[in-house]
Image: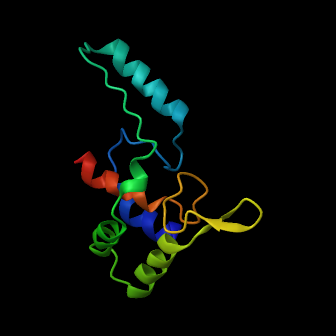
Amino acid sequence: MHRVLAAIYEPLFLDCSYGFRPGRSAHDAVRDLHRHLYSQRVNTVIDVDLSRFFDSIDQQLLLAMIGKKVADRRFLRYLRRQFKAGVLSEGWRAIDQGRWRSTGQLVQPDPREHLRTYSDR
């Protein structure tokens, strides 16, 4: 799954995107931000905390967006099932069924990262 999604979406990301990308880290993002802030005139810096943003993404909309690039129905069905799967935690009990998890996804890169393709442009 990773290879399919990465092959399609990795070339579409802007160079300034760092989240869950191969060969990029939070340290790279901070270094580049520091370089940008001290090499150019900057009037405003906006800090946004998106910690609960991914819980509100419409999974059907995301699947439709991915479906525009991926034609394999079996792959899309598998991805849909991953979205609905619960998370085992707290003594092997399924919790947060159907909700997004910020880390530890079975699907890497995280399918939500592909929404950035549309927001980057």
For residue 49, above or below residue 115:
above
The answer to whether residue 30 is left or right of residue 11 is: right
Return the residue nearer the eye: 96 or 109.
96
Residue 105: image x %, image y %? 57, 60
Which color scheme is applied?
A: rainbow
Residue displayed at 35% across by 42% down: 15
Q: Is residue 41 in view from this perspective?
A: yes
For residue 49, above or below residue 70:
above
Furthest residue in direction right, as rendered: 91
The answer to whether residue 29 is left or right of residue 85 is: left
Return the residue nearer the eye: 56 or 73.
56
Return the residue nearer the eye: 76 or 22.
76
Residue displayed at 49% across by 62% down: 99
Residue displayed at 37% across by 32% down: 48
The answer to whether residue 36 is left or right of residue 24 is: left
Residue 35: image x %, image y %? 40, 19
For residue 6, above or below residue 50:
below
Residue 70: image x %, image y %? 34, 76
Total number of numbered discs in the rendering: 0
Where residue 39 sits, quadrant-wise, is top left
Q: Is residue 10 in view from this perspective?
A: no
For residue 13, above or below residue 50:
below
